[in-house]
Image (cartoon, helix red, strand yellow):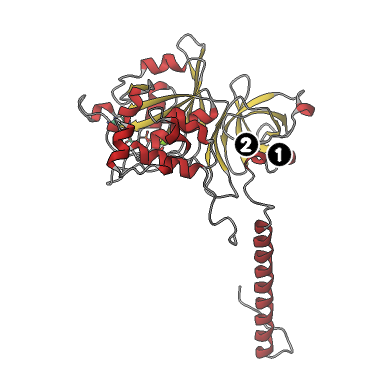
Amino acid sequence: MPRKYRLGQSREAQDMDHREAYSGERAADSKRRQRRAERLETGIESHDATSLLSLPDPAPWLHLPEATLIQRFSQWVDLELEDRSTLRATLGGKLKGVHLVCGDRVRYSPIPIEATDTKRPQAQVVAIMPRRSLLKRGGIDDREPWQLICANADELWICAAVVDPPLRPGLLERALLLALDAGLTFRVLVTKRDRASKKDTLPELDPLRGQGIAIHETSALKGEGIEPLRNLLRGKVVVLLGHSGVGKSTLVNALRPDEALKTGGLTKFGTGKQTTTAARWLPLLAPDGSDGGVLVDTPGIRTLSVRGLNRDLLAQVFPEFPSEVLEDPLAFDPDDEATLERLDLDYPERLQSLQRLWQEMDDRNPNQNIWR
Ligand SMILES: Nc1nc2c(ncn2[C@@H]2O[C@H](COP(=O)(O)OP(=O)(O)OP(=O)(O)O)[C@@H](O)[C@H]2O)c(=O)[nH]1
Ligand SMILES: [Mg+2]
C-alpha cells in the first residue's frame, strides 16, 4: 500500500518514522524468535512422542452418535455415519492439539443449519474414541515426532510396481517395521504384472519370500489377481501404501468399480505424479450386500521414516541375523569378508540395511534447537 504523508511533517521525518517503526518490528520479531529458541533449548517443546498420541477422555460424550473419519482436510473432516451417508464436520475446541487421522472413530454433535446450505459443515466433532490400532511413521523433526497414517486398520499392503516407478531400497523393510509397530498383518502387492514377463521379478522381494510374508501378484488394468484380494478384504480395514504411481488408486478402482478415483500417469522419468493427495477411507460392498471391507487409499510416499520405533522390532524384520548382531549391528563391518563369511548370510547387503535402520530408529533431529 502506498504510504501517505501526514500533514505538517516533512517527507524526511516521515521516512524516519517509517524506518523506526520498521526496525521496531524487526526487533520484536527477533525477540520472539529468540524466546522460541530458548523454549526449545529448555526442552519445553522438544520430542514428546507419547503425549502426541494420548487422547482426551470421551466419557462425557458417549450419548452422542458415533461416526468414522473418512478424510481429513485442514479446516474440517468428512465423516461416514452408521447409515453409510457422509457428513462434513468441524473440529470442536476440546480437540485442539489432538491429531485426528483417517479411520478414527469420533462422536459428533449436529449443527442446526438450513438444509439448503450443504456446503457448510453440518456437525462438530467433539470426542475421539480409543484406537484399536494406529499406523504411524516417524516424523520429519521433533515438532512432529510422528506422522499418523491411519487409525483402526487391520492390515498394511505395500504396493510395489514390477516396473516403473522403481522401488527404493529399504522401503519394504521400513513398511514391515511400521506394520509390526502397529500390530497389522503385512502383505506385499506386486502391481503392473502385465508390464513385465513372468520371469521378471523384483529381486528386493527374495529375502521376504524366505520369511513367509504373503506376496500377491496383480494387474489392476487386466483384472489379474484381483479376486483373491476381494476375499482377503472381507470384514477388514486395509491400508495401501507405496510410491506415487505404483497403481494404488487403480487397484482401488478395480476392486470398487462403482466409484472411480482419480488416477495419474507417469512422468518421463517413470515416477508418479502425486495424484492422490490425502488418505481416504473407502468402504466396499460384497456382491451379496454384506461388508466387503474397507480400503484406505493414501498419497504416494518417497520413503517411510522409522525414527522413534522400538529397535526390538528389527529381530522380526531381519530374522537371519544372530542376536549378537541385532544387539549392536554397528560393531560388524559390512565390507569385511571374514565377518560376512562367519555370519553366513544369503543376502550380505542386508547387514548395511539393518545398520541404517538401527541408527535411524534412535535418531533425533539435529535441527531441533534452531530457530523456526
Ligand atoms: N500397465 C499397467 N498400468 C497400471 C496398472 N496399474 C496402474 N497403472 C498405471 O499407473 C499409473 C499410476 O496409477 P495410479 O493408480 O494413479 O497410481 P497411485 O499409486 O495411486 O499414485 P499416487 O496417487 O500418485 O500415489 C496410471 O497411468 C495407471 O494407468 C497396471 O496394473 N498395469
Ligand atoms: Mg493414487
Front position in the image: 236 or 304: 304
**Tag 1 residue:** 95
Compute the Cα span from label 2 to label 1: 9 Å
Can residue 240 be seen by looking at this rendering?
Answer: no
Q: Name which quarter of the figure residue 50 lies in.
A: top right
Q: Quadrant of the N terminus?
A: bottom right
Q: Is residue 335 left or right of residue 310?
A: left
Q: Are marks 2 and 1 in contact (CB under 8 Å)?
A: yes
Asked if the residue at label 2 sits under 8 Å from ligand 2, the reply is no
Position of residue 145 relative to residue 158, above or below, is: below
Asked if the residue at label 1 sits under 8 Å from ligand 2, the reply is no
Q: Amino acid at mark 1?
A: Leu
Dot 2 or dot 1: first in sequence order is 1
Q: Position of residue 278 (x, y in %)?
A: 50, 38
- Give the residue displayed 67% in from the left and 33% down from the top: 122
Q: Residue furthest right?
A: 60
Instruction: Please tell me in which quarter of the rendered image ligand 1 is found.
Output: top left
**Tag 2 residue:** 100
Q: Position of residue 191 (x, y in %)?
A: 32, 28
Q: Amino acid at mark 2?
A: Leu
Position of residue 219 relative to residue 37, above or below, is: above
Q: Is residue 15 left or right of residue 366?
A: right
- Give the residue displayed 66% in from the left and 52% down from the top: 45
Can residue 10 be seen by looking at this rendering?
Answer: yes
Front position in the image: 315 or 191: 315
Front position in the image: 161 or 109: 161
Q: Quadrant of the C terminus?
A: bottom right
